[in-house]
Amino acid sequence: MAKVLIAGCGDLGQGVARHFVAKGAEVTGIRRSGTAFPEGVKGITQDITTLSAKDWPEADLVYLIMTPSGRTAEAYQAAYVDTAQAVVDGFKGRTTPPKVIFVSSTSVYGESRGEWIDDTSPAVAASPTAEKILQAEAILVENFSATAVRCSGIYGPGRYRLIEGVHRGEAWSLNQWTNRIHRDDVVSALCITGEHMLADQTLPAHIIASDGHPASMWEVKLWLSARLQVPPPLPDTVSITDYLPSRGKRIVGQTLKTLGWRPDYPSYISGYESMLPDYQAWLAQRNTQL
């Protein structure tokens, strides 16, 4: 029976946990706060940076899924670098160290002039926060058989910020390239990566998780405006240069597909289409409470 530890058993972690419980694995989840864990998961509520070495459970596979408390270098240090070091310290001296999957970000690619990025592209951080993510990746790769799954912008159930902004008619900033992946597809990417690692297959040190269909932000917002039946906040006259993305990068990963992964939501259209009924229900409920 495989032993799977999910350090950071929030939304994504719980999806992964349910998958491995259904596979018959022994699953332990750790979360900093809250006591809700999926059925069949042994739950631990504690900050992993405060766990003593003896409190770390035995594991064949560890997922490290952290969310920073802010967008500062200090917040990223705490969320990524400190927790990566905690995993190293927690399993130091174990006879058989676990394999590790780290949920990383495509923000480690600093390009912003429309460049194409794939799994072979070198990561050159362009911000202090991206540098912290790369530092955490390096710590894990130096100490374990580890793979960083670099996710582009995650959206999905309950993540209504963009839809709500379009619905409210918020002003649009300069157009840029945007790359996305649905929450459910992140979970399936993490699960298939973990299954290959448990089967002792050698994987690259990093893998891109993105739907493979970069789009301009204005394209996405125009589509949402049409579906929500709200006018876009654009002037009557817009030049063609206004529609051209002025920054951002275009991300297409291939390694995950060679592992057998196929996204259920291969573009923003299918992804946001699936979210709109729940958004309308959430909106109606919110309006009744006002």
Image (cartoon, grey):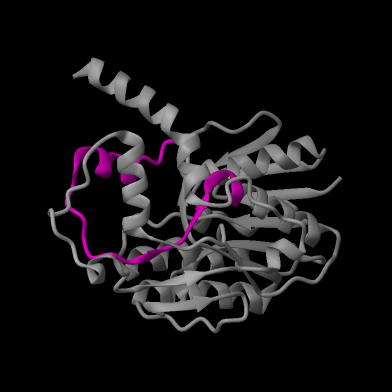
Q: Give yes or no for residue 177 being in the magenta stretch.
A: yes
User: Can residue 10 be seen in this snapshot?
Assistant: no
Residue 144's quadrant in the figure?
Answer: bottom right
The x and y percentages for residue 244 are 31, 69
Q: Residue at x 26, y 43 (%)?
A: 166
- In front: 17, or 228? 228
Side of 181 where 53 appears, left or right: right
Residue 147, placed above or below residue 16: below
At x 30%, y 20%, the residue is 284
Height in image: 214 above or below 224? below
Image quadrant containing the C terminus: top left
The answer to whether residue 73 is seen in the rendering is yes
Left or right: residue 212 compared with residue 254: left
Q: Position of residue 266 (x, y in %)?
A: 58, 51
Q: Residue furthest top?
A: 288
Quarter of the figure with the N terminus: top right
Q: Does residue 121 belong to the magenta stretch?
A: no
Relative to residue 227, is residue 91 drawn left or right? Answer: right
Q: Which residues are magenta?
A: 157-186
Horizontal side, residue 86 vs residue 167: left or right? right
- Residue at position x 81%, y 39% from top? 23
Q: Position of residue 115 (x, y in %)?
A: 45, 79
Look at 32% across and 50% down and name the residue there. 221
